[in-house]
Amino acid sequence: MTVSRLVTLTGARGIGKTRLALRTAAGLRGDFTHGAWFVGLAGLSDPELLPMVVMRALRAQDQTARPAVEALADYLAGKRLLLVLDSCQDLADACAALLEVLLPAAPGLTVLATATGALGVPGETECVVPPLALPNTALPNAALPDPTLPDPTLPVPAPRNGAQPNGAQPNGALPDDDAEAMSLLRERLDVARRGAGREPDPHDRADLRELCRLVGGVPLGIELVAARLAHLPASLALAGLGKWVARHEEAPGVISHAGTLRAVLDWTYELCEPEERRLWLELSVFAPDFDAQAARYVSRHSGRPSGPDGPPLGRLVAAGLVVAREHAGEMRHHVPGALAEYGRHRLRELGDESLVLEAHRDFYLRRAREGEVAWAGGEQVRWQRRLGRDLPNIRAALGYCLRRPAEHEAGLLMACSLWYLWLAGGLAREGRHFLDRLLKVATAPSATRTKALWVCGGVAAVQGDLDWARRRATECLGRAGQEGDLAAAGYGTHVLGVVSLLSGDDDTAIIRITEAIGRHRATGELTPGLLLGLSQLAAAYDRTGVAEHARHLLAECLAKCNEAGELWARGFAVHVRGVAAFRAGDLDAAWAHARDALRIKRLFEDVAGSALCLELLAWVAAGQGNAERAARLMGAAQENWSVFGLSHSGSPFDIPQHAECERIARDTLGDAAYEAVLEEGRRLDLIDAIAYALGEDISRRGHRPG
């Protein structure tokens, strides 16, 4: 990594590229000012999503309508950062094209990629990952290494550290205690046997050495063999696996690493019970991980129901076919890439891939709609985080719908039902990607299409693309009028009101949002549109000097939010209340409201909303005479607003207050000191900036504002 800014680890699937990349990145993290970041590409098939996936992994929150590659290049331009791009092989051309843009644009960027082959980018260094070093299979069970013994194994690459350990045989084979393959097999076997309540067999050493040879030192193959040895004698495993290896040999005694792994997978598949085989194939469609509820649904709705006890997920975990890990208090499951690829291949052979993909899509459509129903209540943060974890599968399900004309309507329903994820989850760019494409292909008039029009308009407004937002909302209103869809008419009008608000046309905004609120109220439900509309209307009234009416609207909004346990809209309302208090000269109330809003924005990881709260706090600090705090908060606000993809000059909110805040801070501190403190604020990442604004300790993270 010291001689090349792009290193690609290559090798067959299952050879351990990802593990090696993670270990390498962990060792190098301290050399990069902005850290090391992992981007998993397994299961991603749409090349247009690639820069968006990288941006999300980097927590680069640019949600504007400009090209994602341009936004990503700008974000990385001033950073010294290590980027790990894992599993590039399925999008090799797209990865190469992206890196050809990013590497020249970001001189501090270094990339460690993994793929089955080189990416072909100028300046790339390819490092072929070898299999693990093998034990000398000619040794008897109790013998010491004899360097004169011939090696009957296939040719073995040198150990991964590039050196020959003491005791190595001339051909690269090692004594048992030094061989990486044997060490891994014993380690995994001890765990598997303890889990099964079995004691080690002191007589199977020779068979274990031979099993290491059969799998060619491929780590995934070793782990699958170890899992089976928990219940299967080594001699039987050797006999069964040996037959499959012979079938995949290209010539007697000659087999590639890919052929070896295929032999291990065929043997493992043969050992599975029928319901285990079926579940393996069904789980292969997930990208890349999932929860148990998703696994149960797909298994029960993919044409071949599981047995009365449900899908045998636990047995697949024990067999090493599924990896289970706890994440944020939830158990997530993952099928390793080579196993998923094998399962998809088998699924196609059976002719069942479409059935399983449809069940997969149906599950995430149901989950999206459940989240939409729950969004007006007190479970918003949980739903946002759940669907954030599900995002790779949501992408896969929407991609499936885009590829199949018969599924376009279902895809459109899913995309518009996820409006809360696009808007509250920092995913406006991805939401726009799917909504625009699905609206282009799902052209038949329907209630779903009419809803998708206002959702797309709302997303475009958040991106600052006001012309497109206006066009979509106007089309929505036309369709809603023809269809008698009062709810869609309310939201279409609402989007037009937001466009006016963001354009600085407060009078028109008041007319349109008032009309929209009336239509939201007519539904008889507590809708997110009603709650947001109340705070947006209050903001417009406050800016036009009708402060009393603004206070009444905010009081109503907050009462409804508090009663329902709603937080997202409450965050907007509290921020508006803080701005109103600042305008009224009540600095203490403005400070308290801005901090309250900031705490809510932190829960949703709302970058733009947090930046606005930091800006408001800067105004208050300047008004209270604390110029240093004001400058630092202003720097943090500007930096994080730019992370969202907008310059502060493009913000429609309260530019005079910003200019006055800067004037006070600069006059008090002097130009040089002001610029120095402003830069301190810019160096705070969002987590530290929020902690600083809330008076929390950030010293443990290594950022100490002066």
Image: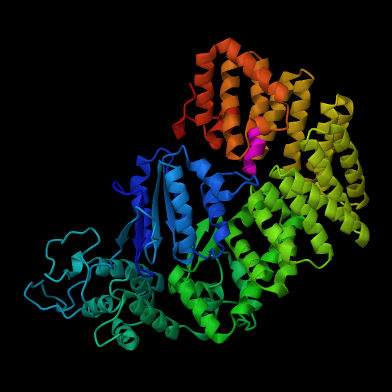
Query: How was the colour assigned to the protein in this rendering?
Result: rainbow
Q: Is residue 61 left or right of residue 29?
A: right
Of all residues shown, which one is farthest toward the left? 148
Q: Is residue 204 left or right of residue 675?
A: left
Q: Is residue 253 above or below residue 130?
A: below
Q: Give the residue displayed 68% in from the left and 44% down from the top.
A: 463
Q: Is residue 136 above or below residue 69?
A: below
Q: Quadrant of residue 437?
A: bottom right
Q: Is residue 549 left or right of residue 297?
A: right
Q: Quadrant of residue 31?
A: top left
What is the span of residues highlighted in magenta in the rendered image? 602-613
Q: Nearer the viewer, residue 284 or 474?
A: 474
Q: Give the residue displayed 37% in from the left and 66% down from the top.
A: 117
Q: Give the residue displayed 55% in from the left and 37% down from the top.
A: 687
Magenta stretch, main secondary structure class: helix
Q: What x and y, as percent, mark residue 589?
A: 74, 23
Q: What x and y, as percent, mark residue 373?
A: 77, 57
Q: Is residue 148 above or below residue 116?
A: below
Q: Say whether residue 612 is magenta.
A: yes
Q: Quadrant of residue 548?
A: top right
Q: Is residue 555 shown to the viewer in this render?
A: no
Q: Say whether residue 20 is magenta.
A: no
Q: What x and y, as percent, mark residue 152?
A: 17, 81
Q: Is residue 520 shown to the viewer in this render?
A: yes
Q: What x and y, as percent, mark residue 582?
A: 75, 22
Q: Give the residue displayed 80% in from the left and 36% down from the top.
A: 501
Q: Count of labels shown?
A: 0
Q: Is residue 638 left or right of residue 236?
A: right
